[in-house]
Image (cartoon, rainbow, N blue to C red):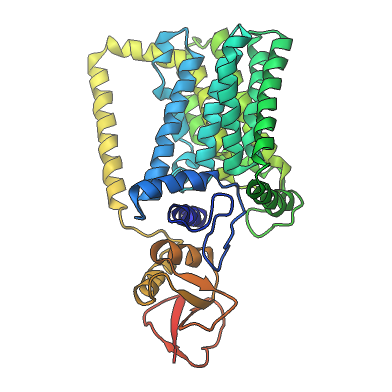
């Protein structure tokens, strides 16, 4: 789940149990007693899942899976919107899903309970709505979609901040590529969306809790990142890092693209029709608007690309859709070949299930030392208590609180228990004796 995802699960569970508030969520009573590192909407939504399904560790897994399925459905709807007048290609909606899933950002970070998947779902919803608004000839018919698209942008920014604003460019990009409306119609629709966004935030910020929470987020996270004041995590020497990683994570889907294009190119049957080329350009430009602005800040990580990946997948799938459609038609005339492909896919599915089941209960290399120690500590220290700690890692804070609601205090040590970090040269404390044997990194001591 990565450390961030564990922390977010802790915050969401606290909200569900009445600890902290929406605008002032809490991680633990000692570490981030008020958490303003990110806007709070994802924690608020996930807290509903904890309220409905309890505090078990499967809740955040279920939430992550729900967001994944919702996002996949939106990708399929985006595809159908692009081929609304072409039922044959519209039925190939699994094709962009395949390109989407080939990207490691997707299969690594949708299960990770990070903020980007939820933000990405809202940006997909916003773009789909604004796309529909752009294709309505009469302005009155577009108003409902403009309102929905604007509210989805608000939700995206309340999930991860300013990076959720890129859907605002969609109406302009649609006009730029398709020219299905006049320049002034495009300007009117864009102005309505922006105005709705501003009005919504003005109304939100009349609440003092919202004003204080978002103000602290901008100070501590946004401005500090842009000014390179936060260099502990994900700080890059080059602003072009994110573009390099975008290319690297796209290699599998680019190879599939080449694999599908090469036979047609070799047979000199490769011809991109105007409709597909324009559609692919539109999708690609949305992906660019979602990824290139990330270069502004030196704080960059490749999972920040997650909301952009669906649009690059849609673009590549659009280019090869006619080729895939023709190949599937040819298969209908060769039933033996079709059956062989079906058997191969079933075998691949079986191998995937076996591989996945073999991983149940496994501990990642990152956690193979820390997590067993934390489980031993949790079995001794009373549930819900606070311990002193001359140790601080995100894993220690997250796992102790998520699984046992144990707080660690790194400033005061006047508690019954004290945790030391074996990776640091710290002498054994006076008036304490070791309470656990067999730990490898985090050692538990009890006051005498």
Asked where in the image residue 157 lies, by quadrant, the reply is: top right
116 left or right, relative to 73: right
In the foreground, 131 or 72: 131
- In the image as oriented, which residue stretches furthest toward the right? 227
Q: Position of residue 375 (x, y in %)?
A: 37, 69
Relative to residue 285, is residue 70 depicted above or below? below
Q: Position of residue 28 (x, y in %)?
A: 51, 64
Query: Which residue corresponds to the image point at 38% horizontal and 75% vertical from the top-left?
Result: 382
173 left or right, relative to 69: right
Total numbered labels placed on residues in the image: 0
63 left or right, relative to 207: left
In the foreground, 100 or 81: 81
Query: Which residue corresponds to the image point at 60% horizontal and 49% vertical from the top-left?
Result: 38
Relative to residue 152, is residue 117 depicted above or below? below
Q: Position of residue 16 (x, y in %)?
A: 43, 52
Asked where in the image residue 158 lies, by quadrant, the reply is: top right
**Image quarter of the C terminus:** bottom left
Relative to residue 447, is residue 305 depicted above or below? above
Query: Which residue corresponds to the image point at 45% horizontal and 32% vertical from the top-left?
Result: 71
Q: Is residue 20 visible?
A: yes
Q: Is residue 265 visible?
A: no
Query: Which residue corresponds to the image point at 26% horizontal and 19% vertical from the top-left?
Result: 337
Q: Position of residue 44 (x, y in %)?
A: 50, 46
């Amino acid at each position: 789940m990565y450390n961030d995802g564990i922390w977010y699960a802790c915050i969401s569970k606290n909200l569900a149990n009445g600890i902290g508030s929406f605008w002032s969520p809490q991680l633990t009573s000692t570490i981030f007693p008020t958490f303003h590192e990110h806007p709070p909407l994802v924690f608020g939504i996930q807290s509903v899942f904890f309220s409905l399904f309890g505090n078990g560790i499967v809740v955040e897994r279920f939430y992550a899976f729900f967001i994944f399925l919702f996002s996949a459905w939106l990708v399929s709807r985006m595809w159908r919107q692009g081929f609304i007048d072409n039922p044959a290609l519209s039925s190939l909606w699994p094709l962009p899903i395949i390109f989407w899933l080939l990207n490691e950002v997707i299969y690594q970070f949708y299960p990770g309970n990070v903020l980007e998947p939820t933000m990405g779902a809202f940006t997909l919803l916003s773009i789909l709505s604004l796309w529909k608004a752009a294709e309505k000839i009469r302005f009155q018919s577009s108003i409902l979609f403009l309102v929905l698209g604007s509210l989805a942008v608000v939700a995206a920014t309340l999930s991860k901040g300013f990076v959720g604003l890129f859907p605002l460019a969609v109406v302009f990009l649609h006009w730029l590529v398709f020219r299905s409306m006049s320049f002034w119609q495009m300007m009117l629709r864009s102005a309505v969306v922006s105005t709705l966004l501003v009005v919504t935030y003005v109304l939100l910020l009349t609440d003092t809790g919202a004003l204080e929470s978002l103000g602290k987020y901008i100070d501590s996270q946004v401005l500090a990142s842009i000014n390179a004041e936060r260099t502990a995590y994900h700080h890059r020497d080059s602003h072009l890092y994110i573009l390099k990683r975008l290319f690297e994570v796209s290699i599998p889907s680019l190879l599939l693209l080449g694999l599908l294009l090469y036979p047609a190119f070799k047979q000199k049957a490769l011809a991109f029709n105007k409709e597909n080329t324009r559609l692919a350009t539109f999708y690609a430009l949305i992906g660019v608007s979602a990824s290139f602005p990330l270069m502004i800040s030196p704080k960059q990580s490749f999972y920040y690309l997650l909301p952009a990946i669906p649009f690059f997948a849609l673009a590549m799938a659009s280019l090869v859709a006619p080729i895939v459609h023709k190949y599937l038609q040819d298969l209908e005339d060769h039933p033996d070949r079709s059956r062989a492909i079906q058997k191969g896919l079933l075998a691949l599915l079986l191998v995937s299930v076996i591989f996945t089941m073999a991983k149940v209960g496994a501990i990642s290399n990152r956690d193979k030392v820390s997590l067993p120690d934390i489980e031993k500590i949790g079995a001794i220290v009373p549930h819900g208590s606070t311990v002193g700690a001359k140790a601080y890692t995100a894993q220690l804070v997250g796992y102790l609180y998520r699984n046992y609601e144990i707080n660690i205090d790194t400033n005061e040590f006047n508690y019954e228990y004290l945790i030391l970090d074996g990776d640091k040269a710290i002498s054994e404390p006076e008036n304490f004796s070791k309470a656990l044997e067999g730990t490898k990194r985090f050692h538990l001591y009890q006051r005498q």
